[in-house]
Image (spheres, rainbow, N blue to C red):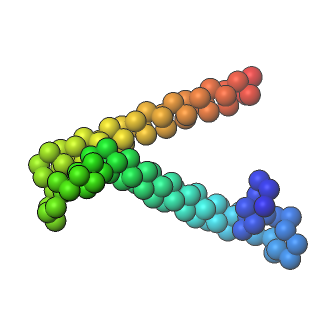
């Protein structure tokens, strides 16, 4: 595939030239698709991590027998999710800042 996704590759054999508008629409769709996949991945990782932290021991020792979460379990899961999202935001901001700094250096 290379750097160009096949859907946008202007050099792909048999591909028809696309207008700038078509190119931008496809690029936006691909960006949105990537963002949706990233959010799904983040949710899956958060779910797995918070389950391991808050629920796994209760399931193993048998104390999680009800269909409803205990108040302690709810608090633990909520706290874990808030911390996970906050950490992801901090990492994202640091990554964005580093990329902007690198781009500024390349402009000089």
**Residue drawn at (36%, 41%) of the image:** 84
**Residue drawn at (48%, 55%) of the image:** 41
Tell me if residue 20 comes above or below residue 85 in the rendering: below
Q: Seen in the image, is 81 located left or right of residue 107?
A: left
Percent from the top left, x then y, of residue 24? Answer: 65, 61
**Residue drawn at (56%, 58%) of the image:** 34
- Is 73 in front, or is 105? 73
The answer to whether residue 39 is visible is no
Tell me if residue 95 comes above or below residue 85 in the rendering: above
Task: Tell which residue pokes out farthest to the left in this image.
Answer: 71
Quarter of the view holding residue 85: top left
- Is 95 in front, or is 15? 95
- Is 84 in front, or is 54? 54
Q: Seen in the image, is 97 located left or right of residue 47?
A: right
Percent from the top left, x then y, of residue 101? Answer: 62, 26
- Is 60 in front, or is 9? 60
Percent from the top left, x then y, of residue 20? Answer: 71, 63
The answer to whether residue 105 is visible is yes
* The N terminus - image quarter: bottom right
**Residue drawn at (81%, 71%) of the image:** 17
Percent from the top left, x then y, of residue 52? Answer: 34, 48
Q: Seen in the image, is 64 located left or right of residue 33?
A: left
Q: How many marks?
A: 0
* The C terminus - image quarter: top right
Tell me if residue 29 comes above or below residue 94 in the rendering: below
Quarter of the view holding residue 40: bottom left
């Amino acid at each position: 595939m290379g750097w160009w996704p096949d859907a946008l590759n202007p050099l792909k054999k048999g591909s028809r030239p696309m207008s700038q508008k078509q190119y931008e629409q496809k690029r936006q769709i691909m960006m949105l698709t990537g963002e949706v996949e990233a959010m799904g991945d983040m949710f899956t990782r958060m779910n797995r991590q918070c389950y391991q932290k808050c629920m796994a021991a209760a399931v193993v020792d048998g104390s999680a027998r009800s269909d409803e979460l205990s108040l302690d379990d709810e608090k633990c899961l909520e706290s874990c999710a808030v911390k996970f999202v906050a950490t992801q935001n901090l990492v994202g901001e640091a990554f964005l800042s580093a990329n902007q700094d690198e781009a500024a250096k390349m402009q000089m």
